[in-house]
Image (spheres, rainbow, N blue to C red):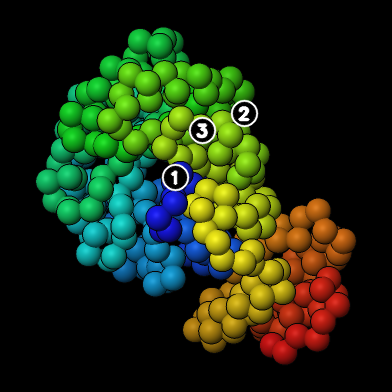
Amino acid sequence: MTESATQRLSVAPMMDRTDRHCRFLHRLISRQTWLYTEMITAKALLHGDAARLLRHDSSEHPVVLQLGGENPRELAHAARLGQEAGYDEINLNVGCPSDRVQSGAFGAALMARPDHVADCIGAMAAQVGIPVTVKCRIGIDAQNPQETLPRFIDTVAAAPCRTFIIHARKAWLQGLSPKDNRTIPPLDYGLVHEIKRARPDLTIILNGGLRDVPHALDASKGLDGAMIGRAVYQNPWLLADADRLAFGSTAAMPERAHIVEQLIHYAEREVRAGTPLPAITRHAIGLFTGMPGARLWRRILSEEAPRPGAGADVIARAASQVLGQAWAA
Ligand SMILES: Cc1cc2nc3c(=O)[nH]c(=O)nc-3n(C[C@H](O)[C@H](O)[C@H](O)COP(=O)(O)O)c2cc1C
């Protein structure tokens, strides 16, 4: 980070989205924005193919492993694996409302159990030397966030946890789909600011409904940072001014042509190693959002990348249509 860094900007953890290919693309566009994995459950890490689940590129730093779970011993072990794999930070998911997560009584359901979250964080922090952080909601169901959120934060901060990323809306665990839970419960940025005023010693990061980097920085003035999810996934190019605006970088803005060129080299390597091309291109569909040729780019990638034997030349072809240059793939 540059000396003048004032804000911590990050791309939100998103299941089935922020896998290593997605993060690689985001890192090409912004060198300093913090990146998060999809949520990985502690159980999956302990009983599954940990090496595959933890895999990431050395260019991804700073990169955070997000864990899901509610068993302190399992979470501590999983955090340790994350540290050994080279992650910069471990984040506990206390915000996800899906049924699968609720049946495991973790994710947003943990908002009702601050003491237990503190136990989990304490166990994790005892196992690793990197920061252990929390991503949470302002509350769940019938909770009154004005009362319950400060109590939650104080309890977990004592665990110790110094950084909270707060998705500034409730999760309604009964009756709303996970998707609706990201739009219907109203946003309350004011409460997140109140938390920061009450606990200036903590790092408080705002998440939820932030449209782009300028909006994120504006809405999080007085806080320690902002996290953007869907907007960046849909239009990764929003990250192009992140280093300059959020981190005070004086480096030149990236150019789409250069990013695409690096993406092609990455795809060549990955496809050779057995990665299906769409696993990479699906994250790049929105790269030209709002530009002439965006539809053509989307169409070529979505139609041609899934064809048997498709290689990085598909990206080159799409790029040459949009950027009007010859691309050597
Ligand atoms: C497809 C999708 C998957 C998500 N998966 C996770 C997840 O694994 N862990 C998590 O903490 N939040 C997850 N979220 C929530 C986001 O991290 C973020 O809190 C939410 O989308 C609000 O931010 P936004 O309005 O900037 O998108 C997911 C959101 C979406 C859209």
User: In this rendering, is residue 180 above or below 128?
Assistant: above
Residue at point 17% right, 45% down?
A: 125
Q: Quadrant of the C terminus?
A: bottom right
What is the C-alpha distance between the residues marked 2 and 1?
29 Å
Check if mark 1's residue and mark 3's residue have beta carbons within 8 Å: no
What residue would you read off at disc 3?
220
Neighbours of disc 3 within 10 Å: few (<14), some (14-19), many (20+): many
Nearer the viewer's eye, disc 2 or disc 1? 1
Q: The disc labelled 2 sits on which kind of residue?
A: Thr
Q: The disc labelled 3 sits on which kind of residue?
A: Ser
Place of residue 180 in the rendered image (x, y in percent of width and height, measured from the top left) = 60, 29
Quarter of the figure with residue 214: top right
Q: Report whether residue 56 is seen.
A: yes
Disc 2 element? loop
Residue at point 44% right, 32% down?
A: 223
Residue at point 35% right, 53% down?
A: 65
What residue would you read off at disc 2?
183
Which comes before the other along the chain, label 1 or label 3? 1
The answer to which of 19 and 23 lies nearer the viewer is 23
Q: Which mark is residue 6?
A: 1
Disc 1 element? loop
Disc 3 element? loop
Q: Is residue 30 left or right of residue 308?
A: left
Q: Is residue 106 left or right of residue 282?
A: left
User: In this rendering, is residue 120 above or below 20?
Assistant: above
User: In this rendering, is residue 201 above or below 283?
Assistant: above
Q: Report whether residue 303 is seen.
A: no
Place of residue 79 in the rendered image (x, y in percent of width and height, measured from the top left) = 23, 52
Residue at point 34% right, 36% down?
A: 203
